[in-house]
């Protein structure tokens, strides 16, 4: 057997294993045509793929959606729309609790800061990015050269096309693709059910199945003051799906770690996930105490509480998924792969990349807690705005290719749209979250740590937060705009207490980020790219890249599963909704929404409401359309079951399922529960 044969044999084995499961979050330039033909005797045509891609939508609130009418209607989840519902609500009108129903176009509510993106084209720029960096240069220098080149590519594309242009790193540095998006910012709310219908069963039922949720929302996109008439939109199937049907999900999964090394997975298990879980628990406790002050505080905190509860369950499931069994399997497969690399002269050097990544992860552990606290959202919107403004004006003075990526020219339109949003900000909630953030930093790092010392400036966390929030003008969008337009001089001269806090802590942030980018990120990207080249040498592109919140296609089938000795059905019905409520005597959170209780006699209770599939999905896929082989919309993804929480790290179809709202159930509810026949007719194409 020659040196190539072991690699070839292992690649064949891998391909055989992959073909046995509905696995993969595939990029549209590399659809899983071989797997689909082998498993389902179906090969999607190029026109079929283009149509689905151009009908798919990414929402800047962190979810997915799809065009579903020739008049610009976009379908997504209620929980994806929740932030906008909260922002258009008030103490007098709570659209989260009561729902929103636009009976005419004039009733549709303008969303303050919802941006939607549609992927127009993809271009492989790997060769250009690789050519920009000398592979023999120090890793820090290579990293800087790659970033500068991606900034140039984005800038050239945006100037030439007028489209949002993002260079996306795939295969952990193995490939770079330029994605061009059409942006839409005039988005209006059309329909959202009351939260009790959308999130029936509340937190106890979250990540479970069977489910009985009408987790849907509808927006309409406008352009030049008129409803958009998209060329590509998904026709609605009133019949929906049946058991065993082949279905596809087109959406934007957030992040997976399936191609990460063993050292990276252990870092997540020992540092990253425990730190994030601790922060989530602290924030949830503070938010629940805040919500207990009164109904208005409960309304203001609802979106944050829901988001943190959801993240807490997801991360806890991911941590549990990083079991000894999974890590042992990873260690075995990694050892085999390294052995195969070492057996070939042209790939032998790549085996050492695993050790370099392990060394970088060990170094990262020394500052992991600080990095997570400083680089992830603080929980305070005002602090985030202050930090953004201080960094923005400073970065804007640099050449485009030298800036932090979030302040490159290609990102500024979206940044302005978000930073100058007129969405309400609540002072008492801000003070609660900022004081918690500062108190956590003090407890974790001590009073002499650089960030803590600069942030508190001789005060207690509570005093510092109160002074900053009560004295700031950042509540006003025009004030934020004037600061940015005034540049560094305006920001340096500004005596706003939150801006001052952001200025005092900026140098410690920049030091931390420079350390991470120079000592950690540069190693992970450079060595990850080398491992990716080795994978390509062995398997070609038969392996899909980890998720990156970019558009992906997954395939699967409608299927129930066995749980213990119980057969879990592939679908639920309106019958089940009423039965679940009766089983708990209508107690919260299993009480029926009033509109559903009143509509019982009008409903065909056998109508499907939710269903499950084997599609490969994670967070970010919320709101993704589910389509059949004809390209008809048969559902919208809204969750995964508890067994799916391991999918960040490994795919399994034994019990893990994507959970979706049934297309027939959505139409039935619109007609029989909400009396929105005109909207249902628009969706049904009547």
Image (tube, rainbow, N blue to C red):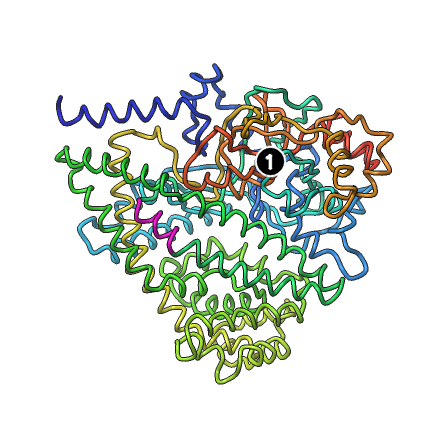
| Residue 536 in the image: above or below residue 457 | above
Total number of numbered labels?
1
Residue drawn where x is 63% and y is 63% of the image: 287
Residue nearer the viewer, 468 or 354:
354
Magenta region includes residue 265 = yes
- Residue 517, quarter of the rendered image: bottom left
Q: Is residue 186 above or below residue 424?
A: above
| Lateral position of residue 3 relative to residue 330, left or right | left
Please give the name of the residue rendered at 48% of the width and 83% of the height, measured from the top-left corner.
Answer: 457
The quadrant of the picture occupied by the N terminus is: top left
Residue 518's spot in the image, x, y percent? 29, 60
Q: Nearer the viewer, residue 377 or 590?
A: 590
Label 1, on which residue?
637
Give the residues in magenta: 262-270
State the residue lying farthest toward the top: 41
Which secondary structure, mark 1?
Answer: strand
Q: Tell me, yes or no, whether the highlighted magenta stretch contains residue 301.
A: no
Q: Residue at x 30, y 48 (%)?
A: 263
- Residue 635 in the image: state x and y as whole percent: 64, 30
**Residue 65 appears in which quarter of the rendering?**
top right
């Amino acid at each position: 057997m020659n040196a190539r044969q072991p690699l070839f044999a292992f690649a064949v084995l891998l391909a055989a294993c992959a073909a046995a499961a509905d696995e993969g979050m595939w990029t549209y330039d590399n659809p899983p045509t071989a797997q689909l033909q082998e498993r389902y005797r179906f090969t999607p045509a190029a026109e079929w793929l283009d149509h689905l891609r151009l009908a798919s939508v990414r929402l800047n609130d962190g979810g997915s959606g799809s065009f579903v009418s020739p008049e610009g209607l976009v379908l997504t989840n209620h929980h994806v729309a929740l932030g906008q519902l909260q922002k258009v609500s008030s103490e007098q009108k709570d659209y989260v609790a009561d729902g929103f129903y636009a009976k005419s176009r004039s009733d549709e509510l303008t969303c303050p800061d919802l941006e939607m993106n549609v992927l127009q084209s993809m271009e492989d720029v790997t060769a250009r990015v690789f050519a920009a960096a000398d592979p023999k240069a120090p890793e820090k220098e290579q990293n800087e050269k790659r970033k500068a080149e991606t900034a140039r590519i984005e800038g050239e594309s945006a100037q030439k096309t007028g489209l949002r242009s993002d260079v996306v790193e795939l295969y952990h540095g193995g490939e770079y693709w330029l994605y061009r998006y059409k942006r839409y910012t005039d988005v209006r709310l059309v329909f959202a059910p009351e939260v009790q219908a959308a999130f029936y069963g509340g937190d106890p039922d979250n990540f479970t199945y069977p489910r009985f949720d009408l987790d849907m929302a509808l927006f309409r996109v406008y352009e030049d003051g008129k409803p958009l008439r998209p060329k590509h939109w998904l026709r609605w199937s009133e019949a929906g799906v049946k058991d065993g049907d082949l279905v596809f999900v087109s959406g934007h999964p957030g992040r997976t770690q399936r191609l990460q090394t063993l050292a990276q997975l252990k870092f997540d298990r020992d540092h990253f996930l425990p730190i994030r879980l601790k922060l989530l628990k602290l924030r949830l406790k503070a938010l629940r105490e805040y919500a207990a002050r009164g109904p208005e505080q409960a309304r203001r905190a609802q979106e944050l509480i829901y988001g943190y509860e959801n993240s807490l369950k997801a991360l806890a499931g991911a941590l549990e998924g990083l079991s000894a069994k999974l890590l042992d399997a990873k260690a075995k497969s990694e050892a085999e792969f390294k052995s195969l690399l070492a057996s070939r002269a042209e790939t032998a050097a790549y085996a050492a990349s695993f050790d370099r990544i392990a060394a970088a992860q060990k170094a990262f552990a020394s500052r992991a807690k600080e990095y997570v606290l400083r680089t992830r959202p603080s929980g305070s919107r005002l602090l985030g705005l202050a930090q953004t403004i201080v960094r923005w004006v400073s970065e804007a003075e640099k050449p485009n290719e030298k800036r932090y990526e979030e302040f490159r020219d290609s990102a500024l339109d979206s940044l302005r749209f978000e930073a100058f949003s007129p969405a309400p900000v609540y002072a008492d909630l801000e003070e609660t979250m900022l004081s918690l953030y500062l108190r956590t930093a003090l407890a974790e790092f001590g009073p002499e740590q650089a960030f803590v010392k600069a942030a508190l400036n001789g005060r207690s966390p509570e005093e510092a937060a109160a002074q900053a929030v009560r004295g700031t003008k950042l509540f006003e969008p025009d004030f934020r705009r004037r600061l940015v337009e005034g540049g560094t001089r305006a920001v340096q001269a500004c005596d706003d207490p939150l801006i001052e806090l952001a200025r005092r802590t900026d140098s410690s942030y920049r030091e931390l980020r420079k350390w991470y980018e120079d000592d950690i990120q540069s190693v992970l990207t450079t060595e990850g790219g080398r491992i990716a080249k080795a994978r390509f040498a062995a398997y070609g592109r038969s392996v899909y890249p980890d998720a990156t919140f970019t558009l992906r296609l997954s395939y699967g089938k409608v299927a129930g599963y066995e749980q213990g000795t119980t057969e879990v059905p592939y679908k639920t019905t309106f019958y089940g909704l009423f039965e679940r409520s009766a089983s708990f005597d209508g107690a919260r959170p299993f009480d029926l929404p009033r509109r559903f209780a009143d509509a019982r006699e009008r409903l065909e209770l056998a109508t499907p409401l939710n269903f499950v599939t084997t599609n490969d999905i994670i967070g970010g896929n919320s709101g993704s359309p589910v389509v059949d082989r004809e390209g008809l919309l048969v559902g919208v993804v809204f969750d995964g079951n508890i067994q799916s929480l391991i999918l960040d790290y490994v795919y399994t179809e034994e019990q893990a399922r994507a959970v979706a709202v049934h297309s027939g159930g959505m139409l039935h509810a619109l007609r029989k529960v909400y009396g929105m026949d005109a909207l249902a007719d628009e969706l049904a194409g009547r």
